[in-house]
Image (spheres, rainbow, N blue to C red):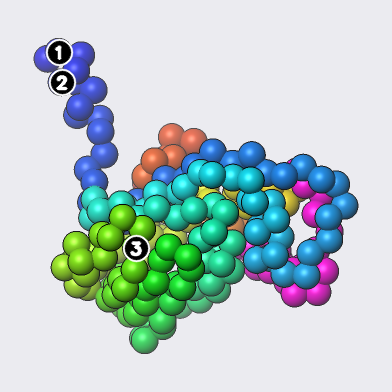
């Protein structure tokens, strides 16, 4: 087998639910004070032009660090916290409405398998029609949750590097971020090798 053929066998299949983060160079300004996690991320990611790429069965959705993720991450944290607490759940809705993305995901959780009915109304690149063809998708609960860990760790690192002072709602947001991240026992598909020592075989 040629080197090229061998390398191709190691490529991931672009299916399921995959999240690849971008490079983050957060604003470093010691002592910044924030009243909400969203406000903190908006400030820390303000000069960042990177995107995280969410692949839903191979269809890319770009999530801008500057304009999308500060709004999405607090909602994603609430969703992940809820999913972590239950093995069965019905009719949990997660909605997105940012500059580039408008969507509604309806979750059903049965025996640690997540079923998501994803409705995409607006996506950068106009991929919403292709995404909506997928209808309901299903994922192992732990696989789905693990995909978010690298992004959450980036947020934690940015807050630490900036020496951010979080007050009131912001402090509660950081506590939720830390709690949710601590409960995740593995990284997502793109980052599994970084997590080789944490509960092998989970994902």
Q: Identify the residue at horizontal 23%, vertical 22% (top origin).
A: 7
The magenta stretch spans which residues?
Answer: 161-180
Single out the mark in the foreground, 1 or 3.
Answer: 3
Q: Is residue 167 above or below residue 90?
A: above
- Give me the disc on residue 123: 3
Give the quarter of the image for residue 88. Answer: bottom left
> How many numbered circles does the render carry?
3
- Residue nearest the observer in this picture, 174 or 49: 49
Magenta stretch secondary structure, dominant: helix
CB within 8 Å, label 1 to label 2:
yes
Quarter-of-image position of residue 90 = bottom left
What element does badge 3 sit on? loop
Give residue 70's mark. none
Q: Is residue 99 visible?
A: yes
Name the residue carrying label 1: 2
Mark earlier in primary sequence (2, 3): 2
């Amino acid at each position: 087998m040629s080197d090229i053929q061998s390398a191709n066998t190691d490529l991931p299949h672009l299916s399921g639910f995959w999240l690849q983060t971008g490079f983050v160079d957060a604003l470093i300004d010691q002592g910044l004070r924030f009243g909400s996690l969203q406000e903190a991320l908006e400030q820390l990611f303000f000069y960042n032009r990177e995107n995280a790429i969410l692949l839903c069965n191979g269809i890319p959705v770009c999530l801008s660090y500057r304009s999308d993720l500060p709004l999405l991450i607090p909602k994603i944290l609430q969703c992940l916290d809820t999913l972590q607490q239950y093995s069965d759940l019905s009719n949990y809705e997660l909605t997105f409405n940012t500059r580039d993305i408008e969507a509604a995901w309806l979750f059903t959780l049965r025996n640690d398998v997540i079923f998501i009915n994803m409705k995409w109304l607006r996506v950068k690149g106009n991929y919403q029609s292709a995404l909506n063809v997928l209808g309901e998708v299903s994922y192992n609960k732990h696989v789905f949750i693990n995909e978010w860990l690298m992004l959450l760790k980036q947020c934690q690192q940015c807050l630490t590097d900036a020496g951010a002072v979080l007050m009131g709602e912001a402090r509660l947001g950081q506590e939720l971020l830390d709690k949710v991240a601590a409960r995740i026992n593995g990284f997502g598909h793109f980052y599994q090798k970084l997590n080789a020592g944490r509960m092998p075989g989970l994902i």
